[in-house]
Image (cartoon, grey):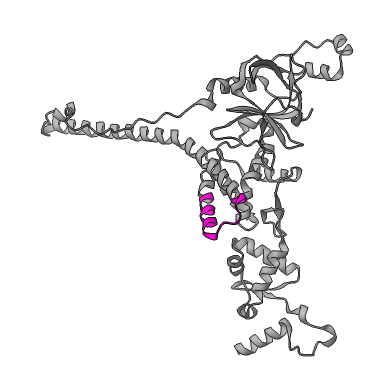
Amino acid sequence: MSVAAADWLPAATVTASGRPVLSAGEIERHLLPLVDLEPEENPRLAPLRGCLLALTSHRLVFLHEASLSARALPLASIVHAYPPHRRHNHNPLRSLFSSSSSSSSSHHPRIRIQISLPPSRSEVVAVVVTCKADVDMFYGRLLEAIRARAWEATASAAPASGAPVAEGAAPAEEDLAIRMPVVGVAGILRKEQETWESAGQNLQDAFQDLNALMSKAKEMMELAEKMRQKLLTNSSAQSNSNDEEMGSKQDMQDLLLSVGIVSPVTKETAGALYHQQLSRQLADFVRVPVERAGGMMALVDVYCLFNRARGTELISPEDLLQACSLWEKFDVPVMLRKFDSGVKVIQTKTHSDDEVFARISSLAQKPDALLKGISPSDAAFTLGIAPALAKEHLLNAENKGLLCRDVSPDGFRFYINLFNEIDLQNIHLPKTHGLYHTWISVATAAH
């Protein structure tokens, strides 16, 4: 049964790469690669088959990856979750007379859940885990999420560390203490003790401020993510705004993008689906920076940007490369590309080399470039990309026959290919028009 048929559950939003969109304050807790959701008592409820189950702090999200659709069961509607069990023990005679679907389903671990559906009816459904997974661990994390009740938790305001004393209030006891003069060994010891006590108090106050900052950091990341999504929605809906407004929105998106990912995919939460879900999350994350960079970014730059956004949940270069290689199996808007020199980049699928070649050709036909050529730094300034990527584009343009390369102790210089302008039938005939004539005119004027 498709996810769309289970209309008794609210629909959940899915990203372009097939990951559930988390709401503000929602954290991903666990993933199960293949589960079914079956009604236990009411046959009118449509079951869900072959879904990826994502347990978050707020919901159970059943994602059908083939159709990129999802349904969600709010944890607030769960009345009770029963421990995992099998419907009956394996009995060859019983399985012989039972249907194949029910027989195969009955041998898998089941977690029965009593839920409350609007307006005021109670139903019992079962999460059937049809894959090899640690069901007990999932059940434990489900209970933890239900007991935490994160969907209704409100952050309490941190108490002020230093409240001002009201006017006319009595002075503190330590203010009334008589300061003894520092005299002799006893005075030196007393002075040393006061110094240590002062340092200890300062350290305690610093840790209190740090704890308050850490408690607010999560809220700020959630707020930043919510604002970034709103800005992206508004920018796509309002395309007729002026350049100043668009520039301020892009600057704000850059600042919010650097705050970080609220719920990064980890090996602990994703398990066997780690690289698959990491690949999808990376595709969602890198789309905006790559588009802002002109449709292409070096893999090493993406690695630094992605790890900075993940905070303490860093990934290795091997994990990043494996996640990028999985994009061939998914319908995502980005892809991994390897140049002939071995340099690897991430680019959008809509990126066109012809547009880049046209800009490089226009740069190489300027009078100054006709004499001195262009360097990777010149192309990088024109294209707005890193010099390493600009060099790869210049080498590609050379392979296409658009440029000629000159290697000297000063480095690489690229010139427009004038051999294309030579007519082999009239090789000695001077031309009075075209690029070759322009080059002759510029060279003559320079001498």
In the rendered structure, the answer to whether residue 430 lies left or right of residue 171 reads: right
- Image quadrant of residue 269? top right
Q: Which quarter shows the C terminus?
A: bottom right
Q: Nearer the viewer, residue 186 or 215?
A: 215
The reply to whether residue 161 is visible in this rendering is yes
Number of numbered markers: 0
Quick check: can you spot residue 300? no
Residue 359, image quadrant: bottom right
Instruction: Verify whether residue 131 appears in magenta.
Output: no
Residue 250 falls inside the magenta stretch: yes
The percent position of residue 298, horizontal first and vertical second, equals 63, 55
The residue depicted at 62 percent of the width and 50 percent of the height is 236
Can you say whether 39 is above or below 292 in the image? Answer: above
Residue under the image location 56 percent in, 48 percent down: 305
Q: Where in the figure is residue 142, as x and y percent of width and height?
A: 61, 22
Q: Give the residues drawn in magenta, as a range.
A: 235-253
Q: Quadrant of the N terminus?
A: top right
Comparing 326 with 58, the one in front is 58
Residue 99 horizontal/vertical position (percent): 87, 16
* Residue 340 versus residue 55 in the image, above or below: below
Residue name at image x 73 percent, y 86 percent = 433
Q: Residue furthest right?
A: 97
- Look at 67% across and 21% down and name the residue there: 135
Q: Where is 317 relative to 75, above or below? A: below
Predominant SS of the magenta segment: helix
Residue 308: x, y in percent?
A: 54, 45
Q: Is residue 255 left or right of residue 85?
A: left
Q: Residue furthest front?
A: 119
Q: Nearer the viewer, residue 439 or 180?
A: 439
Tell me: residue 447, above or below residue 81. Answer: below
**Apparent side of residue 141 relative to residue 37 in the rendered image (left or right):** left
